[in-house]
């Protein structure tokens, strides 16, 4: 998959797990039926440690919204939150439980590199109860991915440190012509 922006297959598998648990196998089949054949094969063959094409993930996110929540612009935000919560609570449980949000967010770049070889995630603004995450050099942008899924996913990681998010926004986005994407979080 040289030249294709990828993300770890586990992110897709946690999404499938959430869909089956909350909407059942029949709904998952309806979602898969909305996908082009090659994308459907990619989704069905996804593996935990293998890399998965982000464009295919975005097609999958569009199909999810179309099938289960056409009038809910935040469905992929909630699924991203649940998926990252599952993934990080299992793999990074000790790291997150004993680290403050500030400590964990200082390591954001390292955490991101475990999920994608593309883009650099940093935390240019970090204060008690507030953080801004910034993604640069991520060559693929889609509203269901950056404005919804990643916003919910990054929020879940912060919350696993034991805080409650008061505000979650995506104020800066490459899709709006900005030079990078940013996510703003405030917590107590």
Image (cartoon, helix red, strand yellow):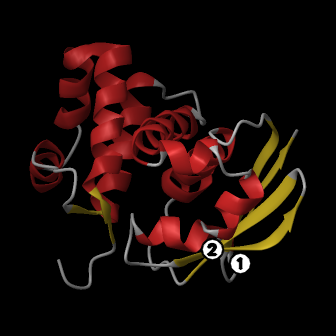
- Give the CA distance from mark 2 to mark 1: 5 Å
Residue at x-position 55% and y-position 53%: 150
Asked if residue 76 is positioned above or below residue 183 in the image, the reply reads above
Asked if residue 90 is positioned above or below residue 115 in the image, the reply reads above
Judging depth in this view, the residue of 131 and 161 nearest the camera is 161
Residue at x-position 33% and y-position 63%: 55
Tags 2 and 1 touching, CB below 8 Å: yes
Report whether residue 170 is seen: no
Left or right: residue 42 versus residue 14 is left
Tell how many labels.
2
Residue at x-position 55% and y-position 56%: 143
Left or right: residue 34 versus residue 86 is left
Quarter-wise, where is residue 164 in the image?
top right
Report whether residue 44 is seen: yes
Left or right: residue 37 versus residue 155 is left
Q: Secondary structure at mark 1?
A: loop
Label annotation for residue 174: 2
Residue at x-position 38% and y-position 16%: 22
Judging depth in this view, the residue of 178 and 98 nearest the camera is 98
* x and y, in percent, of residue 167 in the image: 83, 42
* x and y, in percent, of residue 144 in the image: 51, 50
Judging depth in this view, the residue of 81 and 73 nearest the camera is 81
Label annotation for residue 178: 1
Left or right: residue 5 versus residue 29 is right
Asked if residue 54 is positioned above or below residue 169 in the image, the reply reads below
What is the crowding at mark 1: few (fewer than 14 residues within 10 Å), some, or many (at least 20)? few
Q: Quadrant of the C terminus?
A: top right
């Amino acid at each position: 998959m040289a030249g294709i922006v990828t993300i770890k297959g586990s992110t897709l598998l946690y999404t499938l797990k959430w869909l089956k648990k909350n909407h059942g196998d029949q709904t998952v089949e309806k979602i898969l039926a909305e996908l082009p054949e090659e994308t459907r094969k990619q989704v069905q063959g996804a593996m935990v440690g293998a890399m998965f094409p982000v464009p295919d993930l975005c097609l999958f996110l569009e199909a999810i919204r179309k099938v289960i929540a056409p009038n809910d612009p935040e469905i992929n935000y909630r699924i991203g939150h649940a998926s990252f919560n599952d993934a990080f609570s299992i793999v990074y449980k000790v790291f997150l439980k004993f680290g403050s949000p500030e400590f964990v967010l200082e390591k954001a770049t390292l955490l991101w590199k475990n999920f994608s070889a593309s883009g650099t995630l940093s935390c240019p603004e970090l204060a008690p109860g507030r953080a801004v995450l910034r993604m640069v050099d991520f060559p693929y942008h889609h509203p269901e991915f950056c404005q919804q899924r990643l916003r919910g996913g990054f929020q879940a990681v912060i919350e696993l440190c034991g805080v409650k998010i008061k505000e979650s926004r995506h104020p800066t986005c490459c899709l709006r012509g900005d030079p990078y994407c940013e996510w703003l979080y405030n917590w107590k």
